[in-house]
Image (tube, helix red, strand yellow):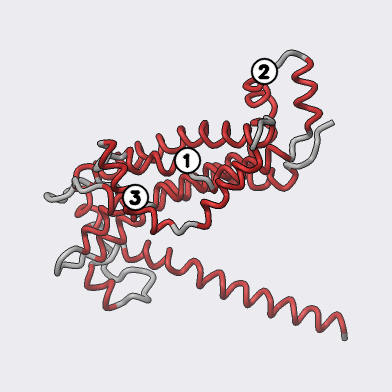
Protein backbone atom coordinates (compact mmCIF):
# COMPACT_ATOMS: atom_id res chain seq x y z
CA UNK A 1 0.00 0.00 0.00
CA UNK A 2 2.79 2.38 0.94
CA UNK A 3 4.67 1.60 -2.27
CA UNK A 4 1.53 2.35 -4.28
CA UNK A 5 1.08 5.71 -2.53
CA UNK A 6 4.70 6.63 -3.19
CA UNK A 7 4.29 5.72 -6.86
CA UNK A 8 1.15 7.88 -7.15
CA UNK A 9 2.92 10.76 -5.37
CA UNK A 10 5.88 10.45 -7.74
CA UNK A 11 3.55 10.56 -10.77
CA UNK A 12 1.75 13.64 -9.41
CA UNK A 13 5.02 15.44 -8.69
CA UNK A 14 6.36 14.56 -12.14
CA UNK A 15 3.18 15.85 -13.79
CA UNK A 16 3.37 19.11 -11.83
CA UNK A 17 7.03 19.59 -12.76
CA UNK A 18 6.27 18.94 -16.44
CA UNK A 19 3.45 21.50 -16.37
CA UNK A 20 5.63 24.09 -14.64
CA UNK A 21 8.43 23.38 -17.13
CA UNK A 22 6.08 23.92 -20.07
CA UNK A 23 4.85 27.18 -18.53
CA UNK A 24 8.44 28.38 -18.16
CA UNK A 25 9.52 27.39 -21.66
CA UNK A 26 6.37 28.55 -23.47
CA UNK A 27 7.48 32.22 -23.79
CA UNK A 28 10.61 31.05 -25.60
CA UNK A 29 8.57 28.77 -27.88
CA UNK A 30 6.14 31.62 -28.54
CA UNK A 31 8.99 33.97 -29.40
CA UNK A 32 10.62 31.46 -31.74
CA UNK A 33 7.33 30.63 -33.45
CA UNK A 34 6.29 34.28 -33.78
CA UNK A 35 9.57 35.18 -35.45
CA UNK A 36 8.39 33.14 -38.47
CA UNK A 37 4.88 34.62 -38.51
CA UNK A 38 3.53 37.84 -39.91
CA UNK A 39 2.58 40.51 -37.37
CA UNK A 40 -1.08 39.81 -38.13
CA UNK A 41 -0.68 36.10 -37.39
CA UNK A 42 1.13 36.87 -34.14
CA UNK A 43 -1.98 38.69 -32.92
CA UNK A 44 -4.63 36.45 -34.46
CA UNK A 45 -3.10 33.04 -33.61
CA UNK A 46 -0.79 33.59 -30.61
CA UNK A 47 -1.22 30.02 -29.31
CA UNK A 48 -0.43 28.37 -32.64
CA UNK A 49 3.07 26.94 -32.31
CA UNK A 50 3.61 25.94 -35.95
CA UNK A 51 3.08 28.97 -38.23
CA UNK A 52 0.39 28.50 -40.85
CA UNK A 53 2.11 31.03 -43.12
CA UNK A 54 5.82 30.39 -42.59
CA UNK A 55 7.84 33.47 -43.56
CA UNK A 56 11.38 34.81 -43.27
CA UNK A 57 10.18 38.36 -43.84
CA UNK A 58 10.79 39.36 -40.23
CA UNK A 59 14.50 38.57 -40.50
CA UNK A 60 14.67 40.41 -43.82
CA UNK A 61 13.12 43.42 -42.08
CA UNK A 62 15.84 43.26 -39.43
CA UNK A 63 18.73 42.94 -41.84
CA UNK A 64 17.54 45.27 -44.60
CA UNK A 65 15.79 48.04 -42.68
CA UNK A 66 16.36 51.45 -44.26
CA UNK A 67 16.09 53.31 -40.95
CA UNK A 68 18.00 51.06 -38.51
CA UNK A 69 21.19 49.02 -38.73
CA UNK A 70 20.64 45.80 -36.79
CA UNK A 71 24.22 44.61 -37.33
CA UNK A 72 25.54 47.91 -35.95
CA UNK A 73 23.52 47.42 -32.78
CA UNK A 74 24.64 43.80 -32.53
CA UNK A 75 28.29 44.78 -32.98
CA UNK A 76 28.00 47.58 -30.41
CA UNK A 77 26.56 45.13 -27.90
CA UNK A 78 29.28 42.54 -28.56
CA UNK A 79 32.06 45.12 -28.06
CA UNK A 80 30.43 46.60 -24.96
CA UNK A 81 29.82 43.21 -23.36
CA UNK A 82 33.31 41.95 -24.22
CA UNK A 83 35.06 44.99 -22.75
CA UNK A 84 32.84 44.79 -19.67
CA UNK A 85 33.77 41.16 -19.03
CA UNK A 86 37.50 41.78 -19.54
CA UNK A 87 37.59 44.75 -17.17
CA UNK A 88 35.29 43.09 -14.66
CA UNK A 89 37.40 39.93 -14.55
CA UNK A 90 40.55 41.79 -13.53
CA UNK A 91 38.96 44.46 -11.34
CA UNK A 92 36.59 42.18 -9.45
CA UNK A 93 38.93 39.21 -8.93
CA UNK A 94 41.89 41.36 -7.85
CA UNK A 95 39.66 43.33 -5.48
CA UNK A 96 38.18 40.12 -4.09
CA UNK A 97 41.68 38.69 -3.59
CA UNK A 98 42.69 41.79 -1.65
CA UNK A 99 39.73 41.50 0.71
CA UNK A 100 40.16 37.74 1.09
CA UNK A 101 43.92 37.15 1.34
CA UNK A 102 45.69 40.45 2.11
CA UNK A 103 45.53 41.77 5.66
CA UNK A 104 45.53 45.56 5.96
CA UNK A 105 44.06 48.02 8.51
CA UNK A 106 40.32 48.48 8.16
CA UNK A 107 39.91 45.68 5.62
CA UNK A 108 36.71 44.25 7.08
CA UNK A 109 35.24 47.69 7.77
CA UNK A 110 35.82 48.79 4.18
CA UNK A 111 34.28 45.57 2.90
CA UNK A 112 31.19 46.13 5.06
CA UNK A 113 30.87 49.66 3.68
CA UNK A 114 30.98 48.23 0.16
CA UNK A 115 28.31 45.69 1.05
CA UNK A 116 26.17 48.47 2.52
CA UNK A 117 26.09 49.98 -0.95
CA UNK A 118 24.03 46.99 -2.08
CA UNK A 119 21.14 48.30 0.02
CA UNK A 120 20.94 51.49 -2.07
CA UNK A 121 18.27 51.13 -4.79
CA UNK A 122 19.84 51.31 -8.22
CA UNK A 123 17.20 53.80 -9.41
CA UNK A 124 18.57 56.40 -7.00
CA UNK A 125 21.91 56.30 -8.82
CA UNK A 126 20.48 57.18 -12.23
CA UNK A 127 20.73 60.96 -11.93
CA UNK A 128 24.13 61.06 -10.15
CA UNK A 129 25.56 58.72 -12.77
CA UNK A 130 24.13 60.84 -15.56
CA UNK A 131 25.78 63.97 -14.16
CA UNK A 132 29.10 62.18 -13.57
CA UNK A 133 29.13 60.71 -17.08
CA UNK A 134 28.35 64.11 -18.56
CA UNK A 135 31.20 65.75 -16.62
CA UNK A 136 33.59 62.97 -17.63
CA UNK A 137 32.59 63.32 -21.27
CA UNK A 138 31.55 59.68 -21.65
CA UNK A 139 27.83 60.30 -21.95
CA UNK A 140 26.44 58.85 -25.18
CA UNK A 141 29.33 56.36 -25.37
CA UNK A 142 29.49 52.70 -24.43
CA UNK A 143 31.87 53.57 -21.58
CA UNK A 144 28.86 54.88 -19.66
CA UNK A 145 27.67 51.25 -19.66
CA UNK A 146 31.02 49.51 -19.24
CA UNK A 147 32.43 51.35 -16.22
CA UNK A 148 29.46 50.89 -13.83
CA UNK A 149 29.16 47.22 -14.75
CA UNK A 150 32.90 46.59 -14.35
CA UNK A 151 32.93 47.71 -10.69
CA UNK A 152 29.71 46.07 -9.50
CA UNK A 153 30.04 45.52 -5.74
CA UNK A 154 27.71 42.53 -5.80
CA UNK A 155 30.19 40.55 -7.87
CA UNK A 156 33.03 41.38 -5.47
CA UNK A 157 31.20 39.47 -2.75
CA UNK A 158 30.83 36.23 -4.72
CA UNK A 159 34.50 35.56 -5.63
CA UNK A 160 35.67 36.96 -2.30
CA UNK A 161 33.73 34.25 -0.47
CA UNK A 162 35.22 31.63 -2.78
CA UNK A 163 38.76 32.95 -2.22
CA UNK A 164 38.28 32.91 1.56
CA UNK A 165 37.39 29.20 1.37
CA UNK A 166 40.80 28.36 -0.16
CA UNK A 167 43.00 26.99 2.67
CA UNK A 168 45.52 29.55 3.89
CA UNK A 169 48.12 26.78 4.03
CA UNK A 170 48.36 26.85 0.24
CA UNK A 171 49.15 30.57 0.21
CA UNK A 172 51.65 30.22 3.05
CA UNK A 173 53.46 27.40 1.25
CA UNK A 174 53.63 29.52 -1.89
CA UNK A 175 55.01 32.51 0.03
CA UNK A 176 57.69 30.28 1.56
CA UNK A 177 58.69 29.35 -1.99
CA UNK A 178 59.06 33.05 -2.79
CA UNK A 179 55.79 33.64 -4.64
CA UNK A 180 54.35 37.14 -4.70
CA UNK A 181 50.70 37.98 -4.13
CA UNK A 182 50.15 38.25 -7.86
CA UNK A 183 51.67 34.81 -8.44
CA UNK A 184 49.50 33.30 -5.71
CA UNK A 185 46.46 35.00 -7.19
CA UNK A 186 47.26 33.80 -10.72
CA UNK A 187 48.65 30.31 -10.07
CA UNK A 188 46.68 29.14 -7.01
CA UNK A 189 43.55 31.14 -6.21
CA UNK A 190 42.15 31.61 -9.71
CA UNK A 191 42.55 27.97 -10.84
CA UNK A 192 40.92 26.66 -7.65
CA UNK A 193 38.04 29.14 -7.85
CA UNK A 194 37.50 29.11 -11.60
CA UNK A 195 33.98 27.58 -11.32
CA UNK A 196 32.81 30.49 -9.16
CA UNK A 197 34.60 33.07 -11.30
CA UNK A 198 33.13 31.57 -14.47
CA UNK A 199 29.67 31.68 -12.93
CA UNK A 200 30.22 35.32 -12.05
CA UNK A 201 31.28 36.09 -15.62
CA UNK A 202 28.27 34.22 -17.03
CA UNK A 203 25.85 36.25 -14.92
CA UNK A 204 27.72 39.42 -15.85
CA UNK A 205 27.47 38.52 -19.53
CA UNK A 206 23.71 38.01 -19.30
CA UNK A 207 23.18 41.25 -17.38
CA UNK A 208 25.30 43.34 -19.73
CA UNK A 209 23.96 41.72 -22.89
CA UNK A 210 20.33 42.20 -21.82
CA UNK A 211 20.75 45.61 -20.18
CA UNK A 212 17.96 47.93 -21.27
CA UNK A 213 17.86 50.84 -18.82
CA UNK A 214 21.53 51.80 -19.22
CA UNK A 215 21.51 52.19 -23.02
CA UNK A 216 18.06 53.79 -22.89
CA UNK A 217 19.17 56.47 -20.40
CA UNK A 218 22.78 57.18 -21.34
CA UNK A 219 22.96 56.66 -25.12
CA UNK A 220 20.99 58.92 -27.46
CA UNK A 221 22.80 58.33 -30.78
CA UNK A 222 20.89 55.67 -32.70
CA UNK A 223 24.09 54.39 -34.33
CA UNK A 224 25.70 53.84 -30.90
CA UNK A 225 22.66 52.13 -29.42
CA UNK A 226 22.63 48.61 -27.99
CA UNK A 227 20.53 45.80 -29.39
CA UNK A 228 18.16 45.62 -26.39
CA UNK A 229 16.94 49.17 -27.00
CA UNK A 230 17.21 48.84 -30.77
CA UNK A 231 14.67 46.02 -30.92
CA UNK A 232 12.20 48.18 -29.00
CA UNK A 233 12.35 50.73 -31.82
CA UNK A 234 10.36 48.33 -33.97
CA UNK A 235 7.47 49.05 -31.61
CA UNK A 236 7.83 52.84 -31.69
CA UNK A 237 5.01 55.10 -32.76
CA UNK A 238 1.76 53.69 -34.12
CA UNK A 239 3.33 50.82 -36.06
CA UNK A 240 3.93 47.67 -34.02
CA UNK A 241 6.03 45.15 -35.94
CA UNK A 242 5.70 42.24 -33.52
CA UNK A 243 7.15 39.74 -35.95
CA UNK A 244 10.37 41.72 -36.35
CA UNK A 245 10.59 42.16 -32.57
CA UNK A 246 10.29 38.42 -32.04
CA UNK A 247 12.88 37.72 -34.74
CA UNK A 248 15.28 40.19 -33.14
CA UNK A 249 14.69 38.74 -29.68
CA UNK A 250 15.40 35.25 -31.02
CA UNK A 251 18.74 36.35 -32.46
CA UNK A 252 19.62 38.19 -29.24
CA UNK A 253 18.96 35.06 -27.19
CA UNK A 254 21.31 32.84 -29.20
CA UNK A 255 24.58 34.17 -27.64
CA UNK A 256 23.08 33.77 -24.16
CA UNK A 257 22.20 30.12 -24.83
CA UNK A 258 25.65 29.44 -26.30
CA UNK A 259 27.35 31.08 -23.29
CA UNK A 260 25.28 28.99 -20.90
CA UNK A 261 26.20 25.70 -22.56
CA UNK A 262 29.88 26.66 -22.71
CA UNK A 263 29.93 27.41 -18.97
CA UNK A 264 27.56 24.66 -17.90
CA UNK A 265 30.33 22.32 -16.77
CA UNK A 266 31.54 24.91 -14.25
CA UNK A 267 28.20 24.73 -12.44
CA UNK A 268 28.78 21.01 -11.92
CA UNK A 269 32.38 21.58 -10.83
CA UNK A 270 31.18 24.22 -8.39
CA UNK A 271 29.49 21.51 -6.33
CA UNK A 272 32.89 20.11 -5.29
CA UNK A 273 34.82 23.38 -5.58
CA UNK A 274 35.34 23.53 -1.82
CA UNK A 275 37.24 20.25 -1.68
CA UNK A 276 40.98 20.34 -1.05
CA UNK A 277 42.97 18.32 -3.53
CA UNK A 278 45.47 15.95 -1.96
Q: For label 3, count other residues whose C-alpha is less than 10 Å away and answer few (under 14), some (14-19) or many (20+).
A: few
Question: How far separated are the C-alphas under marks 1 and 2?
Answer: 25 Å
What residue appears at the point 68 percent right and 45 percent down from the top-left corner?
Answer: 270
Question: Residue 110: x percent and y percent?
Answer: 59, 41
Which numbered disc, 2 or 3, marks the residue that appears first in the sequence? 3
Q: CA distance from mark 3 to mark 1?
A: 16 Å
Q: Against 225, is 235 above or below?
A: below
Residue 27, relative to residue 62: is it above or below? below
Assign the C terminus to one quadrant of the image. top right
21 and 112: which is toward the camera: 112
Q: Give the mark toward the camera: 2 or 3.
A: 3
Q: Residue at x 37, y 69 (%)?
A: 50
- Identify which residue, 223 or 44, lies in the foreground: 223
Closer to us: 76 or 18: 76
Q: Residue at x 37, y 64 (%)?
A: 31
Gap in Å between the C-alphas at discs 2 and 3?
39 Å
In this rendering, the label closer to the viewer, 3 or 1: 3
Q: Position of residue 262 (x, y in %)?
A: 54, 42
The kind of secondary structure element at disc 1 is loop
In the rendering, at what x and y percent does residue 246 appear? 31, 61
Report which quarter residue 126 is drawn in.
bottom left
Q: Quarter of the image holding residue 30? A: bottom left
Tag 1 residue? 151
Give the numbered dot on residue 102.
Answer: none
In the displayed image of the protein, which residue is found farthest to the front? Answer: 105
Mark 2 lies on residue: 180
Mark closer to the chain start, 1 or 2 = 1
Pointer 3 residue? 128
Residue 165 in picture, x, y percent from top left: 74, 40
Amino acid sequence: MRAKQEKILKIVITAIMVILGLICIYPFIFMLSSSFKTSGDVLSTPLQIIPSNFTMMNFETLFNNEFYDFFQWFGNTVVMTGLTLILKFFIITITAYGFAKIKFPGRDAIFLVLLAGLMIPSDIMIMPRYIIFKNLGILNTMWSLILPAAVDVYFVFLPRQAFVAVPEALSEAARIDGCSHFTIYRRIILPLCMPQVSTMLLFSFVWSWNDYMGPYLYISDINKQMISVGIKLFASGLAQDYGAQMAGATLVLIPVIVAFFLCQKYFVEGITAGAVKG
